[in-house]
Image: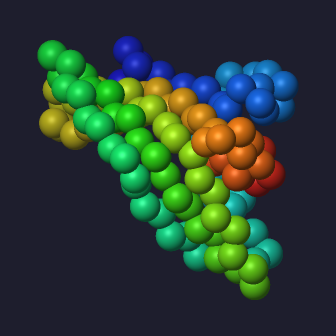
Amino acid sequence: DDRYPFTFVPENYFAAYFIQKWELSDEENYFNNLVSGENQPRLRFEYTDTTLTELPPDHAEFDFGYNLKVITNDTVTYQGKGLFKLFRSTVNDCWYIYFWQDYAVDENYELTWTNLKHLNR
């Protein structure tokens, strides 16, 4: 939906690496690079501490913590907090993320999803 273009807001610690706006095509490229890389990692994801706030009409905000394990020969666990802003399409009644902001927990910047994106773009 052109009314809500996708935006990713990185953990502020890495803002200098994300000078250009991170758009949906960047998100797709990062993910494809991650899963089709030399080691082809397995991913395990879990939400923690979630709060969903519905905002009429057809919007919502989802605050969450996360743990994302990237499993290759070694396992690295990324963790942090995030905020998704969502809208429900009137065309197909599906929810879409149009805004994603990432935050570190306890200043563990290297463990954030932002850093994973930075390393795999």
Q: In what quadrant of the picture does the N terminus appear? A: top left
Instruction: Indicate whether 60 appears above or below 57.
Output: below
* Left or right: where 72 falls relative to 92: right
Q: Residue at x 15, y 16 (%)?
A: 57
81, 116: nearer the viewer: 81
Q: Residue at x 47, y 27 (%)?
A: 99
Question: Which color mode does the image show?
Answer: rainbow
Residue 40 pos. (x, y %): 68, 76
Q: Locate residue 106: give its quadrant.
A: top right
Instruction: Indicate whether 47 appears above or below 84.
Output: below
Residue furthest bottom in the image: 73
Q: Which residue is drawn at 24% across and 23% down?
A: 59
Residue furthest front in the image: 106
* Left or right: where 62 falls relative to 11: left
Residue 72 pos. (x, y %): 71, 79
Count of labels in the image: 0
Q: Which residue is drawn at 22% across and 40% down?
A: 94
Residue furthest right in the image: 16
Residue 93 pos. (x, y %): 16, 36
20, 43: nearer the viewer: 43
Q: Can residue 98 be seen in this view?
A: yes
Residue 60 pos. (x, y %): 26, 27
* Left or right: where 11 falls relative to 16: left
Q: Is residue 36 visible?
A: no
